[in-house]
Each structure stands twice: as C-alpha cells, then as structure tokens.
Amino acid sequence: MPTLPDGLQLRAISESEIPNFVRAIDLGFGNSTPDSRIEAETRIIEPDRSFAVFDGEQIVGTIGAQTLPISLPGGGTGTCGGIAYVTVKPSHRRRGILTAMMTNQLAQSRERGETFSMLWASEALIYGRFGFGVATATQNASIQKVDARFRRDVVDAPGTLKMMSGKAALPHMQHVWNEAMRIWAGMLERREHWWEFKIADPEHERHGATDRYRVVYLNGEVPEGYVVYRIQPDTLELAVEELVWVTEDAHKGLWEYLLGVDLVKTISYWNMTADDPLQWLVDDARRLRRVELDGMWLRLIDVKAALESRTYSADGELIIKINDEFCPWNEATYRLTVESGKASVAEVGAAADLSLNADALGAAYLGGVSFSTLEAAMRVESSSIDRLALADAMFRTERLPWCPEEI
C-alpha cells in the first residue's frame, strides 16, 4: 500500500463514527447534513468497507464500498463492490490520499473474492488511471409536454396502472427489478436494506418538490414495470427518478401515463437507457431532448474470473493481453475460448490478438462499446481486422448495458 505522510492514518470507521463520516462526505460534495441524511445513510453504510483518512481527529479523506452484485450479459450476476463516498479535503490534496484509499479499497475487494468494482464518477478525469472504464451510458432526457404524444398508429398498452404507496409498491418494484436484471447487464442487486433506503422519502431529498409518486404497470396481477417521480411546483417539471420495465407494453403504458399528467410543462429523466425506444414512439422526436453522458464505470478485479462469468454472443477463441499497473495480479495474456456461449480462460504465453489496458476492458466488458470503436480511438491494439471483428461479435449484447442505480 502507498505510504501516507506522517500524521495521516487510513482506517475503517466504527459505527459510532458514521455521523462524522457522513458530514465529511457532504462537506466534500458541498452538501448540508441534516439528521435525516445521517439516518438514511446509516441504513446502507457498511462500516467495515468504509474508510477515512484521519489527520489527528479530523477526517480529511473518505471512501467506502457497498456489496452490490452486478448483472452480467446472459442473465447471471457477478460479485461486485460499489465504490462511493470518495472525497479529499482541499487542504490535503496531492499527498497520495486518493491513491492510498483506492489501493486499499480494491485490495479489500480482492480479499473478499469480488470479481468487479464499480462506481459513478463525479469527475471523469479521476478514475481511468485506477483501471475503471465507462461501461454504461446514460441519457439526460427531457420532453416538452405541450402537444407531446405518441404516433397515431401506436396502440394503447393493455395493462392497468396503479398509483401506490411505497410500502404497497415495494413487492411489485422488487419483482420488476429482479426481472430487469436478466435483461440488462450492469444493474446492481438491491438487498432489503437498499430497498428500505430507496422507499424512504426524507425531506432533505425533496428540494422543494413533492413527495415521491409511484405507479406500477400490471399485466393482470403480474407487475411488468414501474415509475417513481416527483413534481416541482415552481417550474411545473415532472422529474422521473426511476423507470424500470421488462415488457414493451409496460414501457409504453408508463410513458402514456407520464404524458397524461396535467399541469406539467416538462418531463425530465436523468437516466434513460441509451437505446430507449421512446424517441421512435412519439410523433415529434425533436420534442425529446437527450444528452448522453457516462454512467457506471466498471473495473475488473479478477480478469480471469470476469471473462469466465458472462455469456457470449458468438463462439471463438481470442488471445487477449491485459496491461494493469494498478492491479498487477491481472497483468497477463489470456486465452479466451467460448463454446455455446460459455467461456474458459487460461493464461498463455502466445502472441496477442488484442492488447489493451484494464480501463478499456472495463468499458467493453458489458457490451457498451465495441473493440473496433476502442481500436479506432487507439485504446486497443489488434493483430488483424478479423480478430477485431470476432471480439466485437463475441462481446456484443442484445441490449446496451444500463445501470439505473447511482450510488
């Protein structure tokens, strides 16, 4: 582990230190810390995975992780630690604090036998050097509601829509979420304490908007989608916080509902899937404004285990060389052999078909970007066009990956 300057200590926090830990996090992100915020975070913080750098009794750096299994191409899941709470006080910059914290966090993930680490980046220039790559895209979308409607030939969704309280909606939301994890790679499994965190509606999260509304789409008695939203009375904006669906009818029905809410000027959605079909449903796609941004960043803690964990869309054999200075145990050349979509991986000494750094592999692993695109951006070296095309075919997914959970 990198050595910190004298007087600085990196250690896990105790449960009694959670309030000060949360205050230090909020200071780093420029947020206030009401008691409701501490209460909410206490539900999900894992103290043995939450670390602080202390200068005496003062917290000057924070980092933590959540145990959040991740969905993989083919419908399986992989063990994953979700990194969050990363801050360093301006007074203590350029002392190696971030590097020490990240080294410690990834080493702990390896010790726990986790295959992946993920995060959402507040600043995009920080995490590539630690081996994280942009694995999912998100679209910040908004639609002016005046005259916004579906094309005339779009048939109404046949299911029913029910507005529910958080407690009543919870089992339906859990069912939809678990089904969605089989469709989209990149989703994070929600344990009970995470659902409690998501269902809670503390005042500090409202920012002048209404309570959360929850609407579930039902096909008979089976939930197939849900939407969670608030309305900002001052601007008449309906802000979608979460819209998860597992059938086309549910997607269509939920958007029919949103477009029908009265006294709303704009509908916004911070994390629309990159291949969402809404733009092809509305009669005037220009009313739908979308800005694509980076979403979830992924890092492979164990390259061999990761390559063997997912399902592939084409069979074949590739020799892949991975450069990984930050997690040197991964630095090797691997033979990836896929038969009937299932992989076996072994370290070899052969010449590589593809050579790339850990962050590029993290970006391509879930199918969010092709190796051809990364090669054009000089992030991948390939031995031939044919081997590059095979890699694209093997790692391709039916739907683009999506992570609707920002931790």
Image: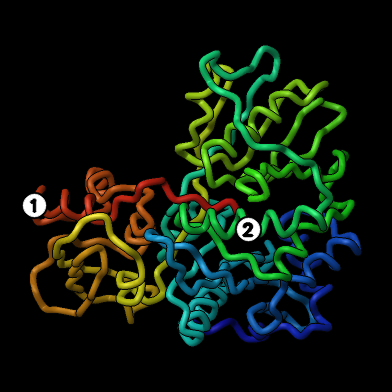
Q: Quadrant of residue 172?
A: bottom right
Residue 5: x and y in percent read: 59, 82
Seen in the picture, residue 118 relative to 397 is either above or below; the reply is: below
Residue at mark 2:
175
Residue at mark 1:
384
Q: Residue at x 75, y 20 (%)?
A: 265
Report helix, strand or loop for mark 1.
Answer: loop
Instruction: Name the residue type under label 2.
Output: His
Residue 211 circle label: none
Q: Residue at x 71, y 81 (%)?
A: 47
Q: Is residue 339 left or right of residue 361?
A: left
Which of these two is toward me, 101 or 225?
Answer: 225
Residues under labels 2 and 1: Cα distance?
45 Å
Q: How is the image coloured?
A: rainbow
Q: Quadrant of the C terminus?
A: bottom right
Q: Is residue 379 left or right of residue 177?
A: left
